Image (cartoon, rainbow, N blue to C red):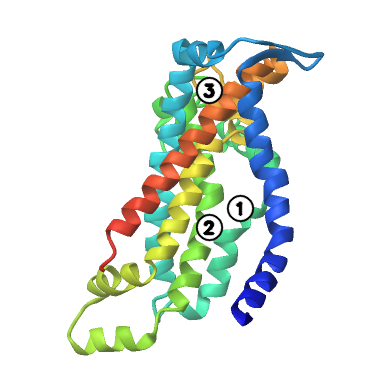
Amino acid sequence: MKSFQNTKSALFYILPAFLLILTFVFIPIIFNLYYSFYSWSAFNMDGVFVGLKYYIKLFKDPVFYIALKNNSLFAIISILVQVGGGLVIAAVLEDKVIRRWQPVFRTIFFIPSVISIAVVGLLWQLLYNPDIGLINEALRAIGQSELAHAWLGDSKTAIYAIVAMSQWQYTGYIVMLFLIAMHKVPGEFYEAATIDGANRIQTFFHITIPQIREMILVGSMITVIGAFKVFDEVYIMTFGGPGRSTEVLGTMLYRAAFRNDEMGYASAIATAIFLITLGLSLLQMRLAKSGKED
C-alpha cells in the first residue's frame, strides 16, 4: 500500500512536466509528420493528400544532399574542435599553475556563447569582408596578400568560414561543461596517479576522460544535434549562397516554407531533420553504453 502511495505521489509530481513535454514536443512532432503527407500552404489550410510525394521529392532533390553534406561537415568539425579542443582547453585550465586564473579564462571563453547570433554573424561578416575585413588586412600586413580572399563570396570557402565562426562562438560553452565535470573528479585519484609516476598526459587519458565520460557524451550530443539544427549562422551570413553552396537543412526548410510556401515539403524536411538527430543521438548513447564495463 505504501509503495502504491509513493508511486501515486511520484506520478503527481511528474505529470506537469509530462504534459508540457507532450504539448510542446511530442504533439508537434506527430502533427508535423501528419502534415508532411499533405500538399498545403500558409494561405490555404485545405490540404490535399499526396502520400510520400514530398519524401520522394526530398530524396531526389540535389540540394538536400548539399545540405546534408554541409550539416555533416558542421558536425565533424564541431566534434573535433568543440569536444576535442574543449577537452584540451578544460584540462589546461585545470592545471595547478593556471587554476588561480581560471575565472578570468572561463569568462573569456564563455562570453561568445552568450552574444546574440545576429551580432556575431554581422561581426564575422565584417571580419570576412574582402576589402576592409580584418582577416584580409592582417594577411596583407604580413605580406601574404595572395591569400586574401572573398571568404563568403567563394563557394569553396564560404561553408568553412561559417563553420569557423560557429566554433569560435560555442567552444567556450562546451569547455564550461567539461570544467564542471572535472571539478567533481576526486583529487585522490590524481594524487595516487602522481605517486605511481603518471605524468599529466597519462592522468588525462586514464583518469580525467574516464571520470567525465558522461559529460563528454552530453557535450557530443549537444554538438551533433546543434550541427544538424544549425540555421541562424547560415541565414545571417549567406542564406545558403553563393549558389546554394552553404545550404543546410535548416535554411532548406525555411526556404521551402516561407519563401516558396510549400508547407508540406517543409514538413517532410523537418521530419528528416528529426529522424537524423534522433538516430545520431541513439547511436551515440549506444556507443557510450557499449564502452562501459559490466
Q: CA distance from mark 1 to mark 3?
A: 24 Å
> Whole-percent x and y of residue 75?
43, 40
Label 2 residue SS:
helix
The crowd level at tag 3 (other Cα within 10 Å; few <14, some 14-19, many 20+) is many
Mark 1 lies on residue: 112
Compared with 275, 55 (above or below) is above
Secondary structure under the numbered disc 1 in the rendered image: helix
Which residue is pictured at 41% across the width and 33% down the height? Answer: 72
The answer to whether the residues at label 1 and label 3 have Cβ atoms under 8 Å apart is no
Residue 113 place in picture, x, y as percent = 61, 53
Residue named by callout 2: 172
Q: With 170 as the anchor, is 66 left or right in this view?
A: left
Q: Is residue 137 visible?
A: no
Q: Is residue 177 above or below residue 236?
A: below
**Disc number at residue 247?**
3
Relative to residue 175, is residue 95 drawn left or right?
A: left
Q: Are marks 2 and 1 in contact (CB under 8 Å)?
A: yes
| Residue at mark 3 to residue at mark 2: CA–CA distance | 26 Å
At label 2, which amino acid type do we have?
A: Gly
Q: Earlier in the sequence, mark 2 or mark 1?
A: 1
Residue at mark 2 to residue at mark 1: CA–CA distance: 7 Å
Position of 259 relative to 203 (above/below): above
Instruction: Residue at 56% x, 36% y: name it.
Output: 230
Q: Are marks 3 and 2 in contact (CB under 8 Å)?
A: no
Q: Quadrant of residue 189?
A: bottom left
Crowd rating for badge 1 (residues with CA inside 10 Å; few <14, some 14–19, many 20+): some
Horizontal relation, residue 32 to residue 136: left or right: right
Q: Which residue appears at 43% of the width and 52% of the height?
A: 220
In the rendered view of the protein, which quadrant contains the C terminus? bottom left
What kind of residue is marked 1?
Pro
Front residue of 102 and 30: 30
